[in-house]
Amino acid sequence: MKLYEVFIRAKAGLSHKHVGSVHASDAQMAMQNARDLYTRREEGESIWVVDSSQIVSSNPADKAAYFEPAEDKIYRHPSFYPFDKEVKNI
Amino acid sequence: MYSQGLRDSKAGDDSPELLEAFQKRIDAEEKIEPRDWMPQAYRKTLIRQISQHAHSEIVGQLPEANWVTRAPTLKRKLILLAKIQDEAGHGLYLYSAAETLGESRHKMYQDLLSGKAKYSSIFNYPTLNWADAGAVGWLVDGAAIMNQVALCRTSYGPYSRAMVRICKEESFHQRQGYDIMIKMANGTPEQKAMAQDALDRTWWPSLMMFGPSDKDSTHSNQSMKWKIKRFSNDDLRQKFIDATVPQAEYLGLTIPDKNLKYNEKTGHYDFSEIIWDELFEVIKGNGPCNQQRMDARNKAYDDGAWVREAAAAYAEKQQNNKEVA
C-alpha cells in the first residue's frame, strides 16, 4: 500500500485544498478511498490524489532563510506609499 | 503525509535550548507541524494518544454494529450505518494524523490486533437493548465530543485539523442518539423502562471516559504544558455532567446517582465519588466484551486478507502492463 495525499475543491471557483491522506494500492483505489473518506457530506466536487513520495516540500529548518527576506522588502506592499487624503481612487 | 518518516529530531538532541524554544512556540499558541523540531517525548505522547484515539473509533463500530440487523425501522438502520461509516472515517483521519509523526498505520494497527495498544474501555461494554444505541450516541458520543471539542485547539496541527472535522460529524451522532432516547422515553412503559435501563448501565462508564481524577492522572501535567491537552479530566467531566443532567430531566429519566444535586454555590452539579476499581478491571482486559471485541477485529482483518492481496496483485499487473506498453 502506498500513501496518497488528498486535495479537495469545495466548489467551482475555489482551489483544491489539502485535507489528509489515504492508503491505496494504486491511484484509482486512492481516488475511491478519498471519495468515501473525505466527501461523505458534500465537502467537494473535485478530488486530486497525489502519491506522497512525489511531493517536494521546503524544509522547516530553512524557514528563516527562505521566507524572512520578504520582511525587509516592505516597498512591495501598497501601504508603503501613503498619499494625502485628497488623492482619491488609488 | 508527505513528511512521513522524516525525523528532524533524533534521540538525544533534546537540548535545553531547543526545548525552551519549543515551549516558547507553544506558549505563543503557534501550532506545531509535522516536520518542525519537537521533543522526543512530545512525539511519543502524541503517537500514543492519537493512535489510542484512532483504535477507539475503530473498535467503537462494534457495539453499534450489533444493532444494524435489528434496528426498528429502515430509517434507523440507514442512520446507524452512516454513523458506523463515520466511526471508521474518524479512525482513518486519526491514523493519518499519527502517521505524520513517523509511525506507520500498519504498526499501529498490529498493536491494536495483538492487544498491545489500548482503546477506550467504554467499548468493552455490551449494547443489550435498542435503547443502548440511543444511550451510546447521547452519552458516549456526548462525552467524546466534550473531550474532542477541547482537542480542536491542541498544539499539533494535523491532530487539531482531524479533530475539527470529527467534531462536526460527531454532533450528528449525539443528536441521533438523543432522538432515539426521546422516542423510547415517550413510548410504552416497557420502552421507557428500556431507556432507563440503558441510562443506568451507560452513565458511570461514560463519566469514566474522561479518565482518572486529576490528582491520579499520570500524563496530565506535561500534556497540559505542551497544550496537547487543554482542559483537565475533572473539568471536562464536570462540564459533561452539567450539560447532560437537564437533558435527562427532559426525557423524564433518572440518573443513577443518589447524590447528584445542583449546587447553588458552585453553579455545578455535585455527584458521587466514582468507583474506579471496575474501570481498572476493564482496562486490564476483564470487561464484559474485551475478548469479543478483539476477536471481531482480528477476524475482520484476517477475512480481509484476500482483498488486500487482490488489490496489490491488480496494482502490480497494471504497472507491468504500463511498462510493456
Image: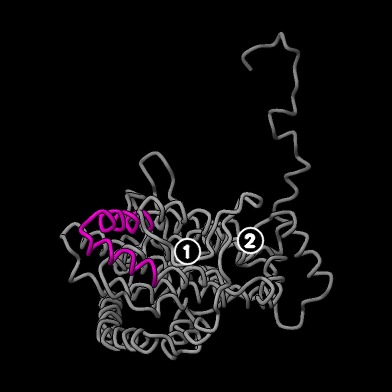
| Quarter that holds the N terminus of chain A | bottom left
Which sits in the foreground, B245 or B317?
Answer: B245
Q: Which residue shows up at 25% across the image and 64% down it?
A: B81
The reply to whether the magenta stretch includes residue B194 is yes
Measured from the top left, where is residue B84 in percent x and y?
Answer: 31, 67
Q: Which mark is residue B164?
A: none
**Mark 2 residue type:** Phe
Q: Is residue B103 above or below residue A72?
A: below
Q: Amino acid at mark 1?
A: Ala
Instruction: Give how far apart the Cα atoms at labels 1 and 2 are.
Output: 14 Å
Please tell me whether residue B172 is drawn above or below residue B282 in the rendered image.
above
Q: Compared to B115, does A12 lie above or below?
A: above
Q: Which of B57/B141 is in front?
A: B141
Which residue occupies the foreground of this view, B281 or B159? B281
Residue B17: name its quadrant: bottom right
Task: Give the label on residue B144, or none.
Answer: 1
Magenta highlight on residue B301: no
Chief secondary structure of the magenta portion: helix
What colour scheme has been applied to the protein in the rendered image? one colour
Name the residue at 51% across, 81% down.
B279
Asked if residue B95 shows in the view, the reply is no
Rendered location of residue B110, percent (x, y)? 44, 87
Q: Which residues are magenta?
A: B174-201
Q: Earlier in the sequence, mark 1 or mark 2?
A: 1
Q: Which residue is mark 2?
A: B231
Q: Chain of mark 2?
A: B
The kind of secondary structure element at disc 2 is loop
Q: Are marks 1 and 2 on the same chain?
A: yes
